[in-house]
Image (spheres, rainbow, N blue to C red):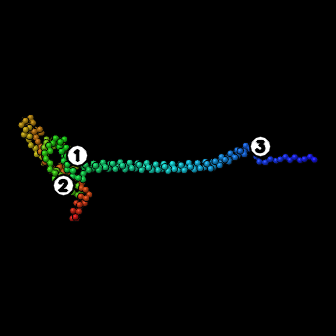
């Protein structure tokens, strides 16, 4: 009796041919790729998005910082402009009498003009509502054009100075009058001037307050 020989049937990958094995390998690689894309690329994309958001926030902060810097520089420029304006105003109307500076300005103009400043006599201040007068009596000697130049120069100084109570006396220079070539000319004539030069100063807040109280009869 002839024995039966069964053909064993194989299963699994061993039963697949080469093409099938390649297809399964490709599918496995594809699954790994999809898993990498989902897991790793997703995390990287989230990190990139977070970085972009952070970058945009930094850009916003930088823009705000630039605006603040521009505003600061603008305020700084305005502050410097106001300081210069205050310095200029203090020259025009100081809050102190500054008698020495007042006299120095007059003497400088007199020297430039060629006028002889014979004498000066400071007077008491005369306060008003918001300012005080700082008067000084002057005696000058010079020629016509020198005196005119002096008065013009006084009007050009920074500080406000009024020239009041001007009295002019003309005398012949005895030495020059002896020379007939200069007789009756400006060279032989001396001009004597007596006047009151009045500068001004701003009253300080406490001074103005006290003055108003005195006017109202307060202490």
- Residue 76: percent from the left, percent from the top? 36, 49
**Disc 1 to disc 3, C-alpha distance:** 113 Å
Q: Is residue 84 visible?
A: yes
Residue lying at the far top of the rendered structure: 181
Mark on residue 125? 2
- Give 122 or 10, whichever is nearer the viewer: 10
**Mark toward the viewer: 1 or 3:** 3
Frontmost residue, 63 versus 9? 9
Disc nearest the viewer among 3 and 2: 3
Closer to the chain start, of discs 1 and 3, is: 3
Residue 17 marker = 3
Name the residue at the right extreme: 1
**Would you say the residues marked 1 and 3 are in contact, meaning their CB atoms lie under 8 Å apart?**
no
Locate residue 207: give its quadrant.
Answer: bottom left
**Mark 1 surroundings within 10 Å by alpha-carbon count, few (fewer than 14), some (14 through 19), many (20 or more):** some
Residue at numbered disc 1: 157
> At x 21% / y 50%, what residue is drawn?
98
């Amino acid at each position: 009796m002839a024995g039966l020989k069964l053909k064993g049937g194989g299963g699994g990958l061993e039963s697949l041919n080469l093409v099938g094995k390649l297809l399964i390998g490709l599918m496995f690689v594809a699954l790994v790729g999809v898993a990498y894309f989902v897991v790793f690329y997703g995390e990287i994309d989230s990190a990139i998005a977070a970085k972009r958001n952070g970058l945009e926030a930094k850009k916003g902060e930088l823009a705000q910082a630039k605006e603040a810097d521009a505003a600061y520089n603008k305020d700084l420029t305005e502050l410097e402009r106001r300081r210069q304006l205050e310095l200029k105003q203090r020259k025009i109307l100081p809050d102190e009498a500054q008698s020495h500076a007042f006299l120095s300005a007059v003497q400088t103009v007199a020297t430039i003009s060629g006028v002889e400043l014979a004498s000066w006599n400071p007077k008491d201040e005369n306060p008003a509502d918001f300012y005080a007068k700082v008067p000084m009596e002057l005696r000058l000697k010079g020629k016509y054009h020198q005196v005119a130049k002096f008065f013009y120069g006084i009007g050009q100084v920074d500080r406000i100075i009024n020239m009041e109570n001007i009295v002019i006396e003309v005398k012949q220079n005895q030495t020059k009058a002896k020379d007939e070539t200069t007789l009756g000319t400006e060279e032989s004539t001396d001009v004597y001037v007596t006047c009151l030069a009045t500068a001004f100063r701003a009253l300080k807040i406490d001074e103005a307050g006290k003055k108003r109280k005195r006017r109202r009869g307060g202490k």
